[in-house]
Image: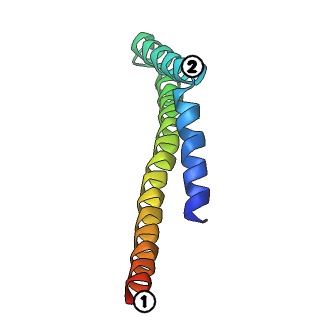
Amino acid sequence: MTPEDELRRAEQARQALETPIVKETLDYMEREITEAWAACPARDLEGREWLWRQMTATRKFRDLLRGTMESGKIAAAQLREKESLAQRALNAVTNRR
C-alpha cells in the first residue's frame, strides 16, 4: 500500500471515529456490555464469557480504526521526508547553475 493510500485510509478512519453516531454507538455498546456484565450472576460463566468477547470485539473495532489513523501519521511523515529530499535535490541542482 502506498503512503497516499495509507493517508486516505487514515482520513476515512478519522472521519468514522469522529462521526457522532459511530462514537455514540461504540460508547453505548461498551456501556451496555459493562452493565450486563455487572448484573450477570457469577455462576453464569458462559454469559460472562460471551459478554467479554463482545467487549473485546467492540474495543478491537475502535482500536483498529485508531491504528489506521496512526499508520496515516507515519505515512504523512514519510511523504514529508520524501518531499524534503526531493526539494533538497532540486535546490542542489538549481544552486549549481
- x 43%, y 82%: residue: 94
Foreground pick, 9 / 84: 84
Q: On the picture, is 69 further left or further right than 12?
A: left
In front: mark 2 or mark 1?
Answer: 1
Residue where numbered disc 1 is placed: 97
- Say above or below: 49 vs 82: above
Which secondary structure lies at badge 2? helix
Residue found at x 42% / y 89% = 97
Distance from disc 2 to disc 1, alpha carbons, whole Å, reads: 61 Å
Residue that label 2 marks = 25
For label 1, count other residues whose C-alpha is less than 10 Å away and answer few (under 14), some (14-19) or many (20+). Answer: few
Residue at (48% x, 46% y) in the render:
69
Frontmost residue, 78 versus 33: 78
Q: Amino acid at mark 2?
A: Thr
Which residue sits furthest front?
A: 97
Q: Earlier in the sequence, mark 2 or mark 1?
A: 2
Q: Position of residue 15 (x, y in %)?
A: 57, 33
